[in-house]
Amino acid sequence: MEKILIEKLIKKAIEMLNFSYAPYSNFHVGAALLTSEGKIYTGCNIENAAYGPSNCAEKTAIFKAVSEGKKEFEAIAIVGGKNGKIENFCPPCGVCRQVLAEFCKKDFEIVLAKSTNEYKIMTLEQLLPESFSL
C-alpha cells in the first residue's frame, strides 16, 4: 500500500477520535477501513454502561461497510488512547480480530498508528494466527 493512502487512512482514523463515546473507560478509538474498491468506512468506539452492548471502532467500521453491501477489504488504520491522546499503538481486541477474520483475507493489512509518520503495518494472520472459521 502506498504511503499517501496509509496517511489518508490514519488521518481519517484520527478524525474519528472526535466522535468516540467513551464516558466509562475514557479510552477513545478511531478506525478507517479501506474496501477493495477504494472506499473508506470509518468507525469509533461507542460504550454503554452495561459494557456488553459497547461497540469497538473496528467493528463499527466493518458493520457500516457490510450493511452497505461491501465485503471485500484491503486495510484498516486504528488509533486510540486514554482521553483521546495517542501515545501508543492500539491493536484490535480479540473480538475485533475475529470479526476481521470473518470478512478479510489473511494478508489484510492492519495499520497501527501513533501519527501519520509513526506507524507499523501487520497482517491479520500475524495478529490472529490460526483463526477460527467455519
Image: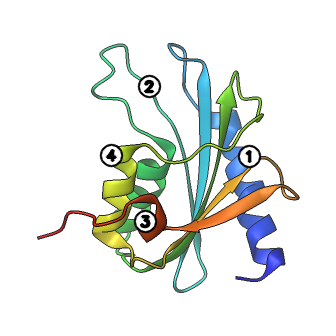
Horizontal relation, residue 18 to residue 42: left or right: right
The amino acid pointed to by label 2 is Glu
Read off the residue under disc 4. 95
Q: Position of residue 90 (x, y in %)?
A: 61, 43
Q: Nearer the viewer, mark 2 or mark 4?
A: 4
Q: Name the residue: 46% across, 59% down.
A: 127
Q: Amino acid at mark 4?
A: Val
User: Could you say which is closer to the camera, residue 71 or residue 2?
Assistant: 2
The answer to whether residue 73 is left or right of residue 52 is right
Residue at label 3?
65
Provide the secondary structure element on which disc 4 rests.
helix
Residue 15: numbered disc: 1
The outermost residue toward the left is: 134
Q: Which residue in the structure is indicated by mark 2?
A: 47
At which x and y percent is residue 87?
77, 34
Mark 3 or mark 4: whose residue is earlier in sequence? 3
How many angstroms separate mark 3 from mark 1 (CA)? 18 Å
First in residue order: circle 3 vs circle 1: 1
Q: Secondary structure at mark 2?
A: loop
Q: Amino acid at mark 1?
A: Glu
Q: CA distance from mark 2 to mark 4?
A: 15 Å
